[in-house]
Every structure is written in C-alpha cells, then in structure tokens.
Image: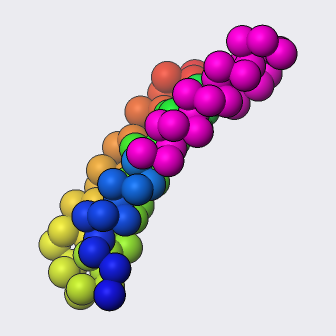
Amino acid sequence: MVNVEDLISLVLRTGVLSGVVITSIGFFTSSEVAWLGVLVLILTPFMRVIMAGLYFLSRKDTVYAALAAYVIMILVIGSFLHII
C-alpha cells in the first residue's frame, strides 16, 4: 500500500519542480509559458488539499474530509476574489 504522506510529498515536489522549470523556460521563450509555470505553482497547494481530502474520504473520516473541503472552498473563493 502506498504511504499517503509520501504520495503528497511527491505531488508537492513535482509541482514545485515542474513549475520552476516551466517558468524558467518561459523567461527565455514567451510570457505565456512563464505564466503557465506560475499557474502550476499556484495549483500545487490545491492538489495537496484535494489529495488529503480524498484520503480522508477513503478512510471514512468525515470530519477531516469536511475540513479539507472547507479549505478548498476558501482557496477557490480567495482566488476568485483576487481575480475580480
């Protein structure tokens, strides 16, 4: 069985590394590619919370799953308020 902490750690490292690489490539090519890298960096914490929520749902831990859903909701609302 896969350890959840190791999987979440892998997702975070992959997200940060790929975001940095894409942003670095964007500095030499175009600003759209650089913004794609920034978007990957922004979405990395979202993926971490989503994975934790799915883990809690699979363990039938409704309190922590609800907390993860609440955090996702706050992140989404905060992102939309920043865009507006």
The spot of residue 72 in percent (x, y) is 38, 52
Count of picture labels? 0
Residue 23 in magenta? yes
The spot of residue 30 in percent (x, y) is 83, 15
The spot of residue 66 in percent (x, y) is 25, 67
Please determine whether, in this image, residue 4 is positioned above or below residue 37.
Answer: below
The spot of residue 59 in percent (x, y) is 24, 86
Q: Which residues, given as a range, are shown in magenta?
A: 13-37
Which residue occupies 40% across, 47% down?
12
Looking at the image, which is closer to me, 3 or 60? 3
Quarter of the picture holding the N terminus? bottom left
Please determine whether, in this image, residue 48 is positioned above or below residue 24.
Answer: below
Residue 49 can be seen, yes or no: no
Which residue occupies 33% across, 54% down?
9
Residue 39 can be seen, yes or no: yes
Please determine whether, in this image, residue 70 is positioned above or below residue 84.
Answer: below
Which residue occupies 83% across, 16% down?
29
Residue 17 in magenta? yes
Which residue occupies 74% across, 19% down?
26
The dominant secondary structure in magenta is helix
